[in-house]
Structures are given as C-alpha cells and as structure tokens.
Amino acid sequence: MSKFHIPEKVVYVCVGSKCSKRGGKDFYKLFKSYKKRYGLKDEVEVIKVDCTDRCKFAPVLAIQPDNIWLKEYSEKEALNLVERLLIEKKEV
C-alpha cells in the first residue's frame, strides 16, 4: 500500500470562464511547471478550481493553509508570491 502524503501548501488556481480568459489556465500550467522545476512534488500541490465565485476579481488564486488570496494578479505578481512562499518558504 502506498503512503498517503499531505503537502505543506496547496495552490488553488481558478480556471472558470472569466479567470481563464484572464490567464487562469496559463497560470495553472505555469505553477505546475514551477513545482516540477524546483522539486516541490511532496511540498506543494497545484489544483484547478472550476470557479471560486469571485469572477469580478479574475484571475483568482489561493494558497492554503496560509489563506492568501490573489485577485486581478499579473504573471509577475503571482510568480513573486509563489517564489517567496513555496520556494524560499518566507512569510508574507
């Protein structure tokens, strides 16, 4: 029986219709590639969410368990936060 691993952090990326139009699907793919590039397989899980019901703030993502939400973010803002939280493991 394989071991059930619980990641330290989970990034939820909205890929609903409005978020997708504003880059949600691209951000999801980007975060998955970062996870792989930095060897964060066991530490971080990246999950697509169909809708967070916050469409007027698209694109939206959340990082748990820190309860950090990004709205109307750019690629640069998202990558900076991901690097600080997930790669450098610093507090925000």
Image (cartoon, rainbow, N blue to C red):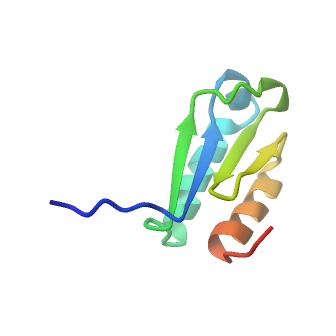
Q: Residue at x 15, y 60 (%)?
A: 1
Of the 4 image quadrants, the one containing the C terminus is: bottom right
| Residue 51 rendering spot, x and y as whole percentages | 64, 27
Is residue 57 toward the left or the right of residue 27 in the image? right
Residue 72 position within the rendered picture, expressed as x and y whole percent measured from the top left? 84, 39
Left or right: residue 19 versus residue 57 is: left
Residue in the foreground of this view, choosing between 28 and 67: 67
Is 49 above or below relative to 29?
above
Given residues 27 and 52, the one toward you in this image is 52
Above or below — where is 20 with respect to 10?
A: above
**Quarter of image, res 42:** bottom left
Q: Residue at x 63, y 68 (%)?
A: 86
29 vs 58: above or below: below
The residue that appears at 62% across and 32% down in the rendered structure is 15
* Residue 24 drawn at (x, y percent): 68, 37
Please state if 54 lies on the left or on the right of 87 as rendered: right
Residue 19: percent from left, percent from top? 72, 30
Q: Please name whichever residue, 78 or 33, is drawn nearer the observer in this view of the structure.
A: 78
Residue at image position (76%, 36%) is: 59
